[in-house]
Amino acid sequence: MKAAECDVLIDMLEKRFTRHLQRHPGVDWQAVQQRLLADPKKLAVLHAMERSGGEPDVVGGPDGSGAYLFCDCAAESPPGRRSLCYDAAALASRKLNKPQDDAMTMAAAMGIGMLTEAQYRALQEVGEFDLKTSSWIATPPGIRKLGGALFCDRRYGQVFVYHNGAESYYAARGFRGAVSV
């Protein structure tokens, strides 16, 4: 990323941070900004999250290492990460009507981890997300081995965890990710 792009991204992240203080009570922006400026690779990851519609924001930290957790905080599953099956094996198994990509491969290419069920539920504690969409979440190996994958959404004031075949994909299902900075 060029210096000017970094400045624009940091300014955008600061404005979002300030607008949504309930997501990170007691966290100081200056400390977050220092971590961001010290790690250009993580800035590039946040830039990729932003470009795909994720609207990353701080939702946790600092942890024991001083890192802050950034998560996709777009109201709905990021639009640039929808219509994806779960992983590369699921994509390869589709014979017809293959989506362009899969969630796990895209997350890895962006440098983020897909949210776990616990992280998804924690995200829902700081806001209401996926009221009209759903998001794939990291699926336990035992479920994945049997051909399934998990996704979540929020309906009727509750967070729901569902299952589907990993090869399925829908226009309203994407994935959310997180990265520690």
Image (cartoon, rainbow, N blue to C red):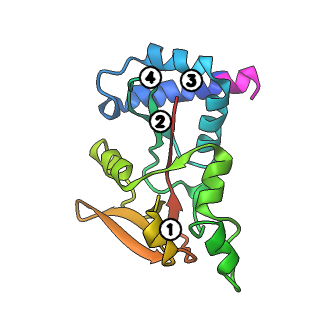
Quick check: 63 left or right of 52? left
Residues in magenta, as a range? 1-6
**Residue 37 versus residue 8: which sits nearer the camera?**
37
Q: Nearer the viewer, mark 3 or mark 2?
A: 2
**N-term-proximal mark, 2 vs 4:** 4
Q: Is residue 85 above or below residue 56?
A: below
Q: Amino acid at mark 3?
A: Asp
Quick check: 22 left or right of 59? left
Residue drawn at (57%, 44%) of the image: 112
Q: Amino acid at mark 2?
A: Phe
Quick check: 65 left or right of 109? left
Residue at the spot of label 2: 70
Query: Residue 80, position in %: x, y?
Result: 62, 55
Q: Nearer the viewer, mark 4 or mark 1?
A: 4
What is the residue that sits farthest to the right in this orientation?
2
Residue drawn at (43%, 18%) of the image: 29
Query: Residue 125, position in %: x, y?
Result: 27, 45
**N-term-proximal mark, 1 vs 2:** 2
- Residue 65 numbered tag: 4
Query: So how many labels did they put on this image?
Result: 4
Residue drawn at (74%, 29%) of the image: 1
**N-term-proximal mark, 4 vs 1:** 4
Q: Residues within 10 Å of mark 1 (few under 14, many from 20)?
A: some
For label 3, the SS is helix
For label 4, the SS is loop
Q: Main secondary structure of the magenta part?
A: helix
The alpha-carbon separation of the residues under discs 1 and 3 comes to 30 Å
The alpha-carbon separation of the residues under discs 2 and 4 comes to 15 Å
The alpha-carbon separation of the residues under discs 3 and 2 comes to 15 Å
Q: Residues within 10 Å of mark 3 (few under 14, many from 20)?
A: few
